[in-house]
Image (cartoon, rainbow, N blue to C red):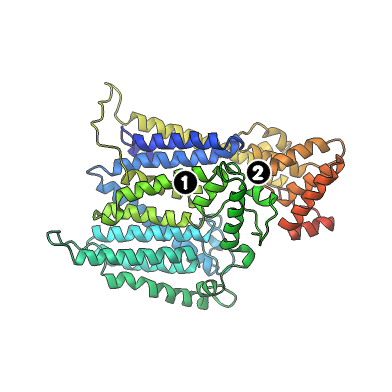
Amino acid sequence: MAVLLLWVPARWPRRLLLLWLAAGVTAIALGHHSELGAWLPACAGLGVIALAAGVGAGLARPGTDARLTAIACGLLTAGLLSALLGLLQYYGLAAPLVPWTTTPDLGQAYGNLRQRNQFATLISMALIAALWLHGKAGHRARLALIPAAALLLLALAASTSRTGLLQLLLISGISACLAWRERHPRQGDPASTRLPPPWALLALIPAYFFAAWVLPLLAGSGVEGMMHRLREGAPDAHSRLVLWANVLELIAQHPWTGWGWGELSFAHYSTLYQGPRFTEILDNAHNLPLHLAVELGIPAALLICGGFGWLVLAARPWRETDPARLMAWGLLGVIVLHSLLEYPLWYGPFQLVFGLCLGFLWPSPPNKAAPAPEGRPAFAPSLAAALALMAIVAYAAWDYTRISQLYHAREDRLPAWRDDTLAKVQDSWLFANQVKFAELALTTVDRANAAEVHALAQRLLHFSPEPRVIVKLIDSAALLGRDEEAFDQAVRFRIAFPRDYARWLDHEPMDDPSE
């Protein structure tokens, strides 16, 4: 990101930056009952999107074809590398590449993206980039794109992501329509063929299902294939329908200002639903409009989503004919589709692409840039911003390194933080909640510290309402004579985490953060 900042033009897209600042101020005002620390990741994500939008606005200017090609090639390369890693993971062959990748269970594929839907979205973006490069390439390069597309298709099938399947259906169908339009131009329009034939694009769909059928057969028994996922679906208590029903019930309780930014996990734990309950810790609504509504309120969600929808409708993407803008719309489309089912905009790679597309599709009005003062290069603001970003990232990496030592066994910690670790990292403000969480987990509750532990557990219940926090809250409340509160928390504990509740009743210890 810091390197890309050097591409930001001298006059950044003012409207996008002002929109970002206004959104941040408004959201903080609406989320007054949330801790400031909860806003740091959101503000950082908005900052990445805004900076990437500045780069995208520069790409929209004439003479930037080489940069567009570099970005498309970068997306394709990232997709192909992830596809190779994913297929190695799927067949249990990724162990020699550790620690450069992970080794999930046999039949699981997600590259280095931690989660198969994110993996599928990266593959879909790489496929869109390959289609754009097809229009720019010569005959030999187009032939080379065929095995690349085949590898991407195999990886998409190996992901067993239903989100990825939906993205493929849209990419195949829309690109086939565009290819047909190229071959049947309107009267007076120039005839140019950039996309493969429509039949070849539509053939991606049966090819995907063939790959989804063959891949698990080659992996051996016990591997869940895409066909099984489509047929069986998710378990009832883990389905998105149950999740969304719970979120809608939470929205109904606080429709105007929401529960507060970062408070969804606490709201989900503390609410006793009338119907089925989503059984996992719920820190995201897995649908961006619903997430904004439950944490910021319905008015804020309508303002943000309605404003974005108005921008899209005003831009009329269905009338686009420029290949570069069509690629940007495609990349934006798969991210938005994924955002209706999960939360890709919580992760830097997707924030980066999202911002690039925004800046490219909605650049600032063309103005003559003011000349740089004598003796100062025109790219000085971009260079200063890049250096500042690198400094911030370096500080965050250093702070993360030392705070993470709390979650390692003593013998695995770095020498500087091997002893008295907790006392040495109390000054962190980026990861203050993580420090407090470790402090609570490592503290034994007794009558002398019950009040202090109770206050800390109440605070951390809003950060991560999981069994280790709940047990400390119940024990400290009981020691303080707050029997009704202890009973209420025990009821919620039993409903939210029945297995951990049974372990607690059997006096089995909870895991400490270093295990």
Tell me if 172 is positioned left or right of 264 in this view: left
Image position, residue 491 (x, y; %): 78, 54
Q: Residue at x 61, y 53 (%)?
A: 249
Tell me if 22 is positioned left or right of 501 in this view: left
Q: Nearer the viewer, residue 327 or 261?
A: 261
Q: Residues within 10 Å of mark 1 (few under 14, many from 20)?
A: some
Disc marking residue 30 = none
Q: Residue at x 36, y 52 (%)?
A: 74
Image position, residue 193 (x, y; %): 20, 63
Q: Residue at x 59, y 36 (%)?
A: 37
Q: Is residue 1 visible?
A: no
The mark that comes first in sequence, 2 or 1, is 1
Image position, residue 329 (x, y; %): 34, 53
Screen quadrant of the N terminus: top left
Q: Nearer the viewer, residue 499 or 493?
A: 493
Kind of residue at disc 2:
Phe
Q: Residues within 10 Å of mark 2 (few under 14, many from 20)?
A: many
Which of pointers 2 and 1 indicates the residue nearer the eye? Answer: 1
Q: Say which quarter of the image contains residue 323.
A: bottom left
Q: Is residue 300 above or below residue 105?
A: above
Q: Is residue 222 above or below residue 498?
A: below
What secondary structure is found at the residue carrying circle 1?
helix
Q: Say which quarter of the image contains residue 229.
A: bottom right
Q: CA distance from mark 2 to mark 1?
A: 26 Å
Query: Pointer 2 and pointer 1: residues touching (CB < 8 Å)?
Result: no
Residue bearing mark 2: 463
**Furthest residue to the left?**
188
Image position, residue 130 (x, y; %): 33, 60
Tell me if 82 is positioned left or right of 284 in this view: left
Residue bearing mark 1: 302
Kind of residue at disc 1:
Leu
